[in-house]
Image: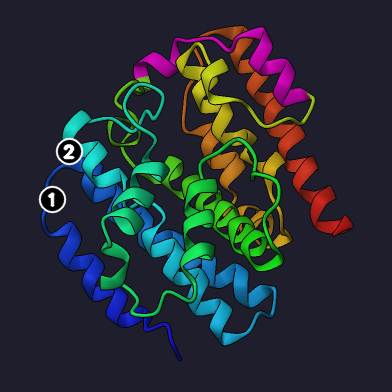
């Protein structure tokens, strides 16, 4: 096989050894990377893909956030709008600076890997992708979102986002625009978020942008909707009421999607 995931993982570990593992953001992204690898394999196997495509999905997952490490080191932030687009930076160091050859010798899959990484953090996948390019762009987006539910359920708020704190979230509000968008089952555009609760709700809204059943089933099995909603005590009565409606709609939506697909 042309893809040696185990060798690529060794190279990845070498690459991230240049960063401070004691930095909570660096640690979070290393753990997240392997969480996304796990989810990419889970989705690819659920889709009954070939061994080649399973290994390719794992390799893309391994590399999808490689731009995050320099972003965290330089800016101590994961906010692409205020710092840099981590997907574009990752593609630059991989393909313009040649880092990709450390992870895979052949250039056979370069275009698929590049487009999957470029599109994984965008609001929507660009048009015009070929069948296999589109397949892997969809897999990495679903896998990334699914492990992000685990991140929001388990990790410290400051490591998730320096603008978030449990205190700020519990005392904040959801803007009408974001709440209405959620209740209309629409993904949330990042630069439209105004409050910390808008940010929290936007993570739950990932469910409206899944390509395959696999990730939604995983969210249901791990009870992530309830875990995320219950992680906070809402001191604003309106926010508390809205979050209960968000919970109900989310659980119902996931059930419907799983049953329909």
Vertical order, 66 against 87 (above or below): below
Q: How is the image coloured?
A: rainbow
Work out whether residue 92 or residue 46 is closer to the camera in this orientation and state it: 92
Q: Residue furthest bottom?
A: 1
Horizontal relation, residue 4 to residue 117: left or right: left
How far apart are labels 1 and 2 at the CA level? Answer: 7 Å
Quadrant in the picture for the N terminus: bottom left
First in sequence: mark 1 vs mark 2:
1
* Main SS class of the magenta portion in the image: helix
Which region is colored magenta?
167-183
Is residue 31 shown to the viewer in this render? no
- Locate residue 43: give its quadrant: bottom right
Label 2: element kind: helix
Horizontal relation, residue 100 to residue 203: left or right: left
Find out whether the residues at labels 1 and 2 contact each other: C-beta distance under 8 Å. Answer: yes
Label 1: element kind: loop
Q: Residue furthest right?
A: 260
Work out whether residue 206 or residue 10 is closer to the camera in this orientation and state it: 10
Horizontal relation, residue 169 to residue 238: left or right: left
Q: Residue at x 26, y 56 (%)?
A: 97
Total residue callouts: 2
Task: Report the residue marked by disc 1.
Answer: 19
Query: Does the magenta segment cover residue 170?
Result: yes
Task: Report the residue marked by disc 2.
Answer: 73
Q: Residue at x 79, y 42 (%)?
A: 253
Image coordinates for residue 101, horizontal then vertical, percent: 29, 71
> How many neighbours does mark 1 have within 10 angstroms: few (below 14), some (14-19), or many (20 or more)?
some
């Amino acid at each position: 096989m042309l893809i040696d995931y185990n060798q690529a993982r060794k190279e990845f570990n070498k690459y991230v050894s240049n960063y401070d593992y004691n930095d909570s953001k660096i640690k979070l992204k290393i753990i997240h990377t392997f969480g996304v690898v796990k989810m990419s394999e889970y989705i690819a196997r659920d889709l009954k893909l070939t061994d080649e495509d399973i290994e390719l999905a794992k390799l893309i997952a391994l590399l999808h956030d490689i731009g995050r490490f320099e972003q965290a080191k330089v800016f101590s932030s994961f906010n692409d709008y205020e710092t840099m687009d981590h997907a574009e930076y990752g593609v630059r160091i991989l393909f313009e600076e040649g880092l990709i050859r450390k992870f895979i010798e052949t250039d056979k899959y370069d275009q698929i890997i590049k487009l999957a990484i470029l599109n994984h953090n965008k609001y929507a996948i660009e048009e015009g992708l070929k069948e296999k390019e589109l397949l892997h762009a969809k897999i990495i987006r679903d896998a990334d979102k699914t492990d992000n539910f685990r991140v929001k359920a388990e990790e410290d708020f400051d490591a998730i986002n320096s603008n978030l704190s449990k205190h700020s979230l519990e005392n904040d509000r959801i803007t009408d625009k974001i709440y209405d968008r959620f209740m209309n089952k629409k993904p949330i555009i990042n630069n439209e978020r105004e409050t910390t609760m808008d940010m929290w709700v936007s993570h739950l809204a990932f469910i409206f942008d899944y390509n395959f059943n696999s990730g939604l089933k995983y969210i249901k099995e791990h009870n992530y909707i309830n875990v995320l909603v219950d992680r906070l005590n809402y001191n604003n009565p309106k926010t508390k009421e809205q979050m209960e409606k968000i919970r109900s709609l989310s659980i119902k939506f996931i059930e419907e999607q799983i049953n329909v697909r």
